[in-house]
Image (cartoon, rainbow, N blue to C red):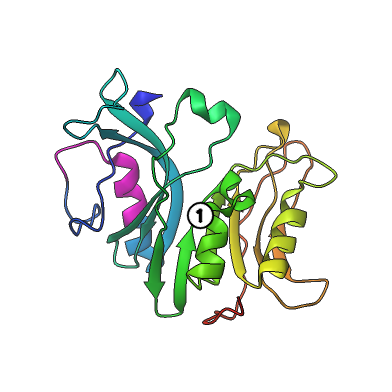
Amino acid sequence: MFPYLEYIPDPAASMWNPCNKSKPFDSEVQTELSCIAKTHSLYVVANMGATLPCPPGDTSCPDDHRYQYSTNVVYAPNGDFIARYFKYNLNKEEFSYFDKPTVVNYTKFTTPFGTFATFCSNDIMHEEPTVTLIKKMNITNIVFPSAWREQLPLMSAIEFHSAFAEGMLINLLAANLHIRTMGYYGSGLYWPTGVSINASYCYNDDVGSGGFLVVDKLTAIYYSIW
């Protein structure tokens, strides 16, 4: 796992644009994501693996002197690195290669079309950070990278995610893996319209099928009823 991880700095500590300026550490994936954002003038949110050295005096430091986190990264339309989220609720199999953060890091970023938060996969089924962000921090637009495996009848991706957007009265932008042979598929944009159809989505479960980019116009939500 370690060769596929990158050091991801804290964007709150210093400004960094990987597409414009190199760093004295391997940042191949981060540079690619930053340049995609800059080239196409859009916000990019992705999940990747991070490694961070233990701080001095950390008595919980692993034997290899570093932590490994499942991490969401966010880039602005000019390529700036603006937000970082460490996954808090790990799946059972993830504990073999990722660490759980000791505290929840509530991650949000502001755009000209509203404030967004980000978390990933299994987080959506837990109070932290999900419910706190929505009900206590008034976040109504969520970007949600995911590796969501279909588990019928109640854990189908488009079923669960559209119901979540409807029930929590938020916009949910969910990007799932598309690996049909492993049960990963179902991405979409979901909004709280109060009607039965509140989504644009990709849900192709044919073996050998490919995913595609889901595009639609959503109305930004600037307030919460909670």
Q: Which residue corresponds to the image point at 57% horizontal and 60% vertical from the top-left?
A: 131
Magenta residue span: 23-34
The image shows residue 40 at horizontal and vertical percentages of 39, 65
Q: How many labels sit on residues?
A: 1
Q: Is residue 53 above or below residue 20?
A: above
- Residue bearing mark 1: 129
Residue 49 visible at all: yes
Where is residue 221 shown, x and y percent of the image?
56, 80
Residue 109 higher or lower than 6, as above or below = below
Question: Quarter-wise, where is residue 148 in the image?
Answer: top right
Quarter of the image for the N terminus: give it: top left
Q: Of the residues shown, which amino acid type is indicated by label 1?
A: Pro
Identified at 66% across, 60% down, the residue is 188
Q: Is residue 97 left or right of residue 65?
A: right
Residue at 30%, 17% (x, y): give it: 63
Asked which secondary structure carries label 1, the reply is helix
Question: Along the horizontal axis of the image, is 220 left or right of 32?
Answer: right
Furthest-top residue in this view: 63
Residue 25 in the magenta stretch? The answer is yes
Any part of residue 146 in sight: no
The answer to which of 226 and 162 lies nearer the viewer is 226
Image-based side of 183 in relation to 85, left or right: right
